[in-house]
Amino acid sequence: MNRLFAEQPVTIFEHVSGLARAHGAVNLGQGFPDFGWPEDVIARAADALISASNQYPSMRGLPELREAVCDHYRAHQGLEVDVDQVTVTSGGTEALTAAIIGLIESGDEVLLFEPLYDSYLPIVRQCGGVPRLARLEPPGWRVTQELLDASFSERTKLVIFNNPHNPTGRHFDQAELGLLAAACVRHDTIALVDEVWEHLLFDGRRHRPLASLPGMAERTVKVGSAGKIFSVTGWKVGWMVAPEPLSAAIARAHQFITFTTPPNLQTGVAYGLGKDQAFFDDMRTQFAAARERLAAGLNEAGFVTLPSEATYFLCVDLAASGIAADDLDFCERAVREAGVAAIPLSAFYDREPVRHIIRLCFAKREETLAAGIERLRAARQLFAP
Ligand code: PMP
């Protein structure tokens, strides 16, 4: 067996969701919504399942979806990309995996930022990449010049950057993106940018793709996911947008991973990406209201929350909330003894994790959040001094 994978534990999301099912817990752990998906997008996919082809679509995706991705980014982010630059994948995860496999060779240095989404590191390591980990520090989680100076080197072939950021809920600002872009240009580094949360922004924020910064169009692979945009996380339809020759190299890897993605789902997503601005605004308004509901309920119950600018996630600082427990211990007891699931932030670190913060998903109906808050209040009592 390959020891890298044989020794990997199951992901924290699978572990916590399994415990949540076993204990009948309210699941505020794994990032999936229990409301908010557009019925017309689902109906369009259902219709395509019956009335359109169910055979292999083209390896790089249905032309209608590839065009819809281009039109969508032009309309929403002012990004000019050509259809030839788009490859449809089976979720953002597959796009990330194909990109890492397609871009790096054994010994190449890859820069990543902790806390980090869990799919990146094992694939970098499997490809023989040499990871360098830069740490974003709570509570601000900012990208600084000092951090970049200490992290980039002449050997940095690839940087993997996630914006908006899971698990912290940060939406990195223009100044931070400017610093990162300048470092990439200076070190001739390719940027693999995981922007799957690009539409889940609050408080009037607008997403600026890293690819739009000076010098970045020719060195950026942008990853997106319909699962997040349309609250259909089980669909696993994603895409990557990259210039040649990066795009072709990654597509070569993609053709041996999944080769293609169910055509009916691609049709539904192509339709959905063309929805008007009001749809996206309304989605944000609903999720922002859910964020406020969870934050207010938790604050009232004595928890200290960190700011959430984007994504489905709100973090709680256990130490600042007067809870002396380690994050994993808190989450294990909360799900087993108080019936509420949360994700420990330490799961997003390779080593020396931050151990006093947990991540909660607020993309839930009012009653789910209310039940979650009450159970977290009870979980807090388990750790009363
Ligand atoms: N990247 C990040 C940062 C994510 O949070 C997620 C999903 N939680 C993904 C990638 C995976 O997206 P998909 O479900 O489309 O594979």
Image: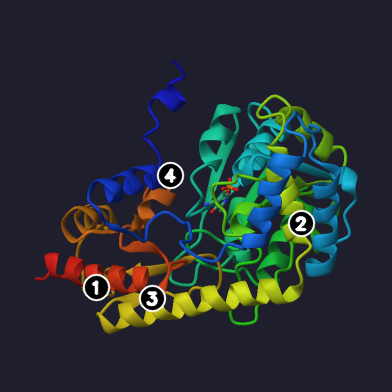
Q: Quadrant of the N terminus?
A: top left
**Crowd class of label 1 (few under 14; some 14 to 19; many from 20; radius 10 Å):** some
Alpha carbon distance from label 4 to label 3:
29 Å
Give the labeled residue for mark 3: 294
Disc 1 residue type? Glu
Q: Are marks 3 and 2 in contact (CB under 8 Å)?
A: no
Task: Work out whether residue 219 or residue 235 is closer to the camera in this orientation and state it.
Answer: 235
Please provide percent x and percent y for residue 93.
Answer: 59, 42
Disc 2 is placed on an element classified as helix
Mark nearest the camera among 2 and 4 is: 2
| Residue at mark 4 to residue at mark 1: CA–CA distance | 32 Å
Residue holding disc 1 = 374
Which comes sooner in the sequence, label 1 or label 3? 3
Residue extending furthest left?
A: 385
**Type of amino acid under label 4:** Asp
Q: Earlier in the sequence, mark 2 or mark 4?
A: 2
Res 271 label = 2
Please identify the residue farthest to the top as the structure is shown.
1
Q: Amino acid at mark 2?
A: Tyr
